[in-house]
Image (cartoon, rainbow, N blue to C red):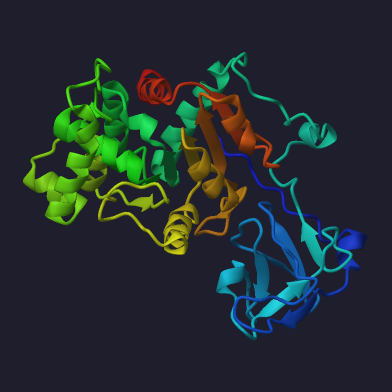
Amino acid sequence: MLFQLREYTAPDFTRDFLQNAPDVKMEKAPKDGVVPENYHATSIFPEYFKIDGQWQFAQESRMDCVAVWDGSAIRVVEFRNIRAGDLVILGRTEDASEGIYVYPHGFRTEEEQQDLFAFRQGRSRETAFSRDYDELYELLKYEKEHGYIVWVMGPACAFDSDSRMAFQNLIAEGYVHALLAGNALATHDLEGAYLNTALGQNIYTQKSQPMGHYNHLDTLNRVRLHGSIEKFIEEEKVDNGIIYSCVKHNIPFVLAGSIRDDGPMPEVLGDVYAAQNAMRQQVSKATTVICMASVLHTIATGNMTPTYRVTADGTVRPVHFYCVDISEFAVNKLSDRGSLLAKSIVTNAQDFVVNVYKGVHEKE
């Protein structure tokens, strides 16, 4: 199967309702972190704003933010990053009647546009995912050369030796461009490399080891003694695992802290907004996002991921989003994000990683 990106079809601005639409209204933000009443909240879809008679395209977006006109371009800004005097776009309609046009149809075929609910398919343990896997293998091979693949991982991905090795190899072979996770993923992955356990269980046999409940704490303490994950890997001669492979191949990873963290690892960002900024820095480049076994990190990432990306040459292309979890509730939490391109797969995360690694090679 030869992979091809869906092409984006821009709105026809010669249509009467777009030509005759008024300019959008704007008002200055009254103070830092505060926007005027009747502000327009952005979505995950492409959005256009009519300013001085011309439709301006928001080149980058995320949901639940506000649109700001800086005199030459539309910026989409979180409420907390608004500054007094920013020119904020106003309006609650999205049909061009207030100079705001939200356009969800750019990547749909004519058949899909005629059947508006064709893409709202519930995913469950009874769903066959064979085609999803085949499409994902081809997508990853394309994105390896042409895109930016961001993976979001929960600690379950580090509990099995085969999945750790599979993901280590995916990193080494160029299928991972950034990793978003929490303290637990890094802790248990490094525990696996250091003591061959994850939460005290052998990562191959899953048998609990004597006093194994200390192992993740011992690992954390050792990393903190060395002052950084990279130094720990060097000094303790760690030679395997997810985090090891990220360090070895200079793959950026963001570890977002949480209230329940042990330790934590020195690289964990304890300031939630610093973590959000770091995550968004990677997501803003993402063309494919794959979230596995971490409901909270998945929701956080999904909320800042639009359905489109504008490439360096000005092409508007889709962003592919996958949610993988053994829980039907978890995968369906974001499956109906309003995006044709959000896919949910109900399966064990460890099996998924191993299947993906095998798949990208078997399909070559």
> Residue at left 10%, top 47%?
234
Write down the quadrant of residue 340 in the picture: top right
Nearer the observer, 337 or 134: 337
Write down the quadrant of residue 102 in the picture: bottom right
In x, y percent, where is residue 165?
Answer: 26, 27
Relative placement, left or right, of 135 versus 12 is left
> Residue at left 24%, top 15%?
205
Nearer the observer, 184 or 27: 184
Q: Residue furthest front?
A: 211
> Residue at left 75%, top 81%?
27
| Residue 341, visible in the rendered structure | no
> Residue at left 91%, top 68%?
20
Where is 264 relative to 34, above or below? above
Where is 82 relative to 116, above or below? below
Relative placement, left or right, of 291 versus 245 is right
Count of numbered marks:
0
| Residue 187, visible in the rendered structure | yes
In x, y percent, where is residue 124?
Answer: 62, 20
Relative placement, left or right, of 319 versus 199 is right
Relative placement, left or right, of 93 versus 142 is right
In x, y percent, where is residue 47?
Answer: 71, 59
